Image (cartoon, rainbow, N blue to C red):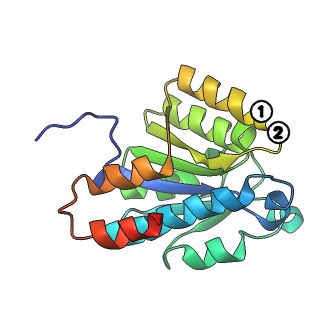
Amino acid sequence: MNTHPNLAAAANSVLVVVDIQTRLTAVMAEAEAVSQCVTVLLAAAQRLAVPVLATEQYPQGLGATEPALLAALPAQTPVLAKTGFSCCAAPGFMEALQVTGRKQVILVGLETHVCILQTALELLFMGYQVQVVADGVCSRDAEHKRFALKRLRQQGATITNYESVLFEWLRDAAHPEFKPLSRLLR
């Protein structure tokens, strides 16, 4: 069956967790809600064999990835340190992405108007299909997030939410992972 190319497909997706670090989340009003969405997507990615990449912006200054999220990352997940705002500038990031052979990139993390925006625009330019999970990203200022999402939509990124991604990865209530994963939404 042919499906719409903008539907997230577990077999073609990579989940990228961008800079959800202790010192950044401490100043984000939406950090706890974002972490909950990301935790659900990480569980789904693990059960559905969706590769995960993670980055940390200047970890010496901003700390490591939030401990709960670090623990939720699949064991083989590379956590790449960076100083450039786009993940594409992180040493090893593009190589790790290319090795997956997948063309859909699902972005979650911090901050929407900086690292998410720059990563998404560069990936779009390189021919990747980019989906930004609106409830899985945040900025210190809600207006900055709003303008970044608007700009990303204008540039061709798909703005989605974590439940849509989860159900698109599953595609059918008959999927063997439907019941265990749908329980995560309660």
Closest to the observer, 67 or 14: 67
61 w.r.t. 121: above or below: below
Regarding mark 1 in the picture, which secondary structure is present there? helix
Residue 134, picture quadrant? top right
Query: Residue 135's x, y, as percent?
Result: 59, 47
- The N terminus - image quarter: top left
| Mark 1 surroundings within 10 Å by alpha-carbon count, few (fewer than 14), some (14 through 19), many (20 or more) | some
Closest to the observer, 49 or 169: 169
Q: In the image, which disc is placed on residue 141?
A: 2
Q: In the image, which disc is placed on residue 144?
A: 1
Q: Is residue 25 visible?
A: yes
* Label 2 to label 1: alpha-carbon separation: 5 Å
Q: Which amino acid does label 1 sit on?
A: His
Q: In this image, 116 relative to 11: left or right?
A: right
Query: Residue 142's x, y, as percent?
Result: 77, 37
Q: In this image, 12 relative to 58: left or right?
A: left
Query: Residue 51's x, y, as percent?
Result: 42, 63
Query: Residue 26's x, y, as percent?
Result: 85, 61
Q: In this image, 113 relative to 99: left or right?
A: right
Q: What residue type is labelled 2?
A: Asp
138 w.r.t. 31: above or below: above
Count of labels in the image:
2
- Residue drawn at 28 percent across, 57 percent down: 170
Q: Do the residues labelled 2 and 1 touch (CB within 8 Å)?
A: yes
| Mark 2 surroundings within 10 Å by alpha-carbon count, few (fewer than 14), some (14 through 19), many (20 or more) | some
Q: In this image, 116 relative to 26: left or right?
A: left
Closest to the observer, 73 or 150: 150
141 w.r.t. 67: above or below: above
- Residue drawn at 82 percent across, 58 percent down: 24
- Residue drawn at 25 percent across, 52 percent down: 171
Residue 147, picture quadrant? top right
